[in-house]
Amino acid sequence: MPSPKRPRPTAVDLPQYVFPILARGKIYYYYQVGRNTAAQGPRIPLGKDPQSPEFWVALREAQGKSAVPIVNTVNLVIDEFLAVEAKRVAATGQATLSASTYDHYRRSLGIAKRAWGTLPVEGVRPAHVKKLMEGMANTPAKANQFLATTKVFSGWAIVSEYITQGLTQGVKAYTTTGGHRPWSDAQVAVALSKFSGNLRKGFMLYLYSGQRGQDVVKLGPTYVDDGGFNLGQTKTGVEVWCPIVPELAAEMAAWERRPGPFLLQPNGRPYTRKKFWEEFIEAIEDIPELAGVTLHGLRCTAAIRLKQAGLSVPQISDIMGMSMQTISRYVKYAERKSGGKEALIKLEEHRASKVKRGAVNVK
């Protein structure tokens, strides 16, 4: 006789006294104090989805009926926050929170859960957040993302009456050095000479579409419209039409024609932004010329190339779905770097001219 199937694990840590039961192929969750003891309390149903706000409402009602004091741990309150935020992520245009932002919330708050998970959330102070920030000094972008997410969580926890003071008050973000830098022409040339297969496809799509990673991995023949990519951006919902330039069109002509995204893993599944990024990081480890580059830096590079081709900042904004302020910042950086190089050349020419006239001692 086959053994009964066990309930599958959930994506959240189940609170104390909550347990799953598998019935008729579905998992149901119940709250019961003292289960399987002589003093067990009543079994109260909570529903089927611990990642839904309704589950947490039912849990709070069940806890209110219990004589056992409930500790609002960091794990418990973060999981409820994520359940509420998950409700704002939708597959339709009605979403009020993007899936990528939710993923940032989940990963950043995972740091807090690992550090303080079983402790009462009311006991967490800005000093504890600062201590975690100091532990991430070598990864300032990650630390800043953690701080920003914790600030959002803190505001929600206050209005939900789980804490009485902010968790991030007085904690300072790290000063970054300009974010993702554009690739140099030499770095682009190295990538073109060494990348192949899906890595080269993805690189070309990043470089010549200028889109974010979550949009690059979904691009396919169905998005091609009158010589360009017509898509709604995942993060912003903005509709953009991005022209397919001749360099990219020449590459695409050799790609297999089939339904679905251009980028497919060997197992036939589409890439996620994270999966493609992981393969990219692994590939450039053995290419010293590409040390320090990022995929998002290709978005900067695309904006600069379009500006150098003669397009205006508003035109680039329409094509890439990027704010004009961000484009202006990228372009200004490139122009400042180019101006510095031109100045260096002029100084060298001036020095050579003086040497030729004998005005400089060249010993």
Image (cartoon, helix red, strand yellow):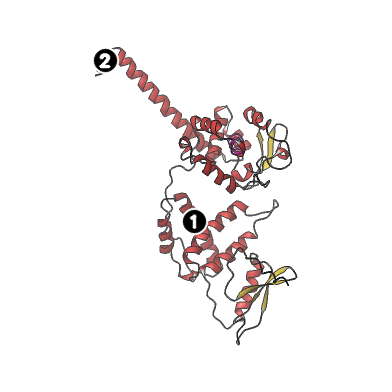
Residue 70 occupies quadrant: bottom right
Mark carried by residue 359: 2
Mark carried by residue 217: none
Reply above or below: 183 against 33.
above
Asked if residue 206 is among those painted magenta in the image, a careful observer would answer: yes
Q: Quadrant of the N terminus?
A: bottom right
Judged left or right of residue 199, residue 335 is left
Measured as percent of width and height from the top left, residue 216 is found at 63, 41
Badge 1 amino acid? Phe
Residue 321 occupies quadrant: top right
Seen from the viewer's position, the closer of residues 116 and 128 is: 116
Label 1 secondary element:
helix
Asked if residue 244 is among those painted magenta in the image, a careful observer would answer: no
What span is in magenta? 199-208
Mark carried by residue 146: 1
Q: Residue furthest front?
A: 1
Q: Quadrant of the C terminus?
A: top left
Q: Residue at x 45, y 42 (%)?
A: 178
Q: Which of pointers 1 and 2 lies earlier in the amino acid sequence?
A: 1
Measured as percent of width and height from the top left, residue 325 is found at 53, 40
Label 2 secondary element:
loop
